[in-house]
Amino acid sequence: MVMAKRKVKDQMKKQKGFTLIELLIVVAIIGIIAAIAIPSLLRARVSANESATIGDIRTVISGEAAFQSANGGWYDTITCLAVNGPGCIPSYPTSAPTFLDSAICSLGGKSGYDRSFQPGQPPLNVNPAVSSLTSLSAYAYLASPISNGQTGVRGFGGDSSGVLCFTPDGTEPGATLGVLPISSGACQVLG
């Protein structure tokens, strides 16, 4: 009995680490798990980027609608929506809130998408006592993936009609004078 215990102790002393085969098996298992998980993580990232961009476009549409109500029925450039006080709307109170957050108005890359703003025509009869001198009759807010296929797969746009649409190939929806090409089918309405 004592002899058997010594043999076990001797074997335990000799076996201090993992064998090369055991380590290779563990590395292979980790590699298989990574090969399964990484594509799912990339799809989840793309989906999150697209959802954030759609949310931002809806926020711009809402902000422009609120601005239109305060600006005598006209829209304005996206930078005006982040201005507090009478900078863009005459007699607008300095204590009043802005219409959009400055992060959305910066038009840089955000959530894996490049953003742009396309103004429409300036209106002909602007009352400077009520409306901004930079007022617009229409606008389009557009977004396309920074790296198509990796940060997003669809391009998005929203305009003064309140419609949000997408292009399935990731290109920025082409807008003309602040109007998206929805009737031509170049930009599909997002339901």
Image: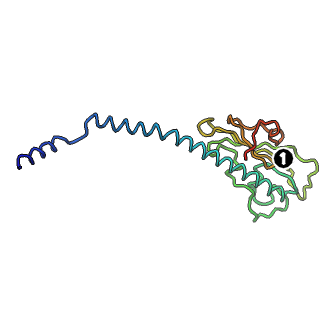
Say which residue appears at 61% left-offset and 35% top-offset.
Answer: 149
Say which residue appears at 82% left-offset and 50% top-offset.
Answer: 76
Left or right, 82 with reference to 13: right
- Residue toward you, 19 or 87: 19
Is disc 1 placed on a helix, strand or loop?
loop
Point out the residue furthest to the front here: 1
Please say if 48 is above or below 68: above
Q: Position of residue 48 (x, y in %)?
A: 60, 47
- Residue toward you, 137 or 35: 35
Q: Residues within 10 Å of mark 1 (few under 14, many from 20)?
A: many
Left or right, 45 with reference to 120: left
Q: Position of residue 4 (x, y in %)?
A: 8, 46
Left or right, 144 with reference to 87: left
Q: Position of residue 180 (x, y in %)?
A: 80, 41
Count of numbered badges drawn on the protein:
1
Point out the residue furthest to the left here: 2
Q: Which residue is mark 1?
A: 138
- Residue toward you, 4 or 75: 4
Q: Amino acid at mark 1?
A: Ala
State the image quarter where residue 146 is shown. top right
Please say if 64 is above or below 16: below
Say which residue appears at 64% left-offset and 48% top-offset.
Answer: 51
Say which residue appears at 32% left-offset and 34% top-offset.
Answer: 24
The chosen color scheme is rainbow
Q: Position of residue 139 (x, y in %)?
A: 81, 46
